[in-house]
Image (spheres, rainbow, N blue to C red):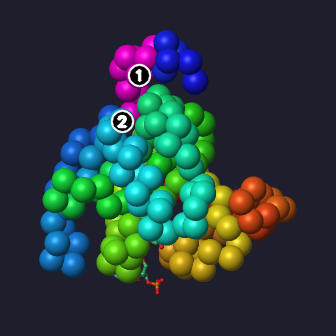
Amino acid sequence: MLKKFKNFFSNKKAKFDFEEQQVRLADQHFILRKAVQKDAIQYMKIQETIYPIPVPWPVDIVEMEIDNRNALYLSLVDQAKVIAFIGVSLSDKKEAHITNLAVHADYHNLGIGHLLLNQVFKYCRQREYQKMSLEVDVTNSSALALYDAFGFKVRTVHKKYYLRNHHDAWEMVVDL
Ligand SMILES: CC(C)(COP(=O)(O)OP(=O)(O)OC[C@H]1O[C@@H](n2cnc3c(N)ncnc32)[C@H](O)[C@@H]1OP(=O)(O)O)[C@@H](O)C(=O)NCCC(=O)NCCS
């Protein structure tokens, strides 16, 4: 994106605010806050711990999304290091859409995926969104277990959706 357009977008006041909070999980304390541009590099590091290179989102997409006024990105921070993030697109008042969710490999199975989804569900319910949707690789068993626990059901299949491996995606949806 041209720099002047990028600056134009980033100078506009954010539509979706989020108040920073302390969260406790498995006797560890974390900070949950809205993402800022300097988190982009840490989002790249998280992706490198869970995906083969090239990771799904290059840095320019990450930066653009953090500035996206129609979305909310939350960063989970442990001792000044971002260790997980979630993004939700909020442009359609009826249906919020999870754009990304990633937890650093060292922090899996602690309940962080549940925590981030719970936060986004709560945020969207408070703003009266009616549904939550997402796309997931049909072979991604850990993500599918998580989404199943939140009641997501398959709405449609997108054949060969992922460019990097040509896997199909399920589009999933749940009522809020
Ligand atoms: C999918 C992904 C986000 C899950 O994150 P996670 O933090 O490991 O998920 P959780 O810890 O909340 O849940 C995983 C397991 O831990 C368990 N768990 C442990 N402690 C928990 C707690 N305190 N609260 C809730 N669940 C807990 C859950 O029950 C769950 O077990 P189950 O799969 O048998 O049901 C993570 O594996 C990841 O980043 N994967 C790569 C990126 C990816 O695939 N993203 C999704 C794209 S669509």
Image-quadrant location for residue 114: bottom left
> Does residue 89 appear left or right of residue 72 in this picture?
right
**Mark earlier in primary sequence (1, 2):** 1
Q: Is residue 11 magenta?
A: yes
Above or below — where is 65 with respect to 147?
above
Above or below — where is 139 with respect to 93?
below
Numbered tag placed on residue 101 in the rendering: none
Q: Nearer the viewer, residue 41 or 17?
A: 41
Image-quadrant location for residue 16: top left
Q: Which residue is mark 2?
A: 37
Q: Nearer the viewer, residue 61 or 116?
A: 61
Q: Nearer the viewer, mark 1 or mark 2?
A: 2
Dot 1 crowding, Cα within 10 Å, few <14, some 14–19, many 20+? some
Chain part drawn in magenta: 7-16
Which residue corresponds to the image point at 40% horizontal and 57% vertical from the top-left?
A: 45
Q: Is residue 93 visible?
A: no
Q: Is mark 1 within 8 Å of ligand 1?
A: no
Q: Which residue is mark 1?
A: 10
Q: Is residue 142 magenta?
A: no
Q: Is residue 50 visible?
A: yes
Residue reaching furthest to the front: 53
Q: Nearer the viewer, residue 125 or 105?
A: 105
Which residue corresponds to the image point at 41% horizontal and 22% vertical from the top-left?
A: 10
Which three-letter amino acid code belongs to the residue tagged 2? Answer: Gln
Task: Find numbered disc 2 in the image and state the secondary structure of the residue it sits on.
Answer: helix
Which three-letter amino acid code belongs to the residue tagged 1? Answer: Ser
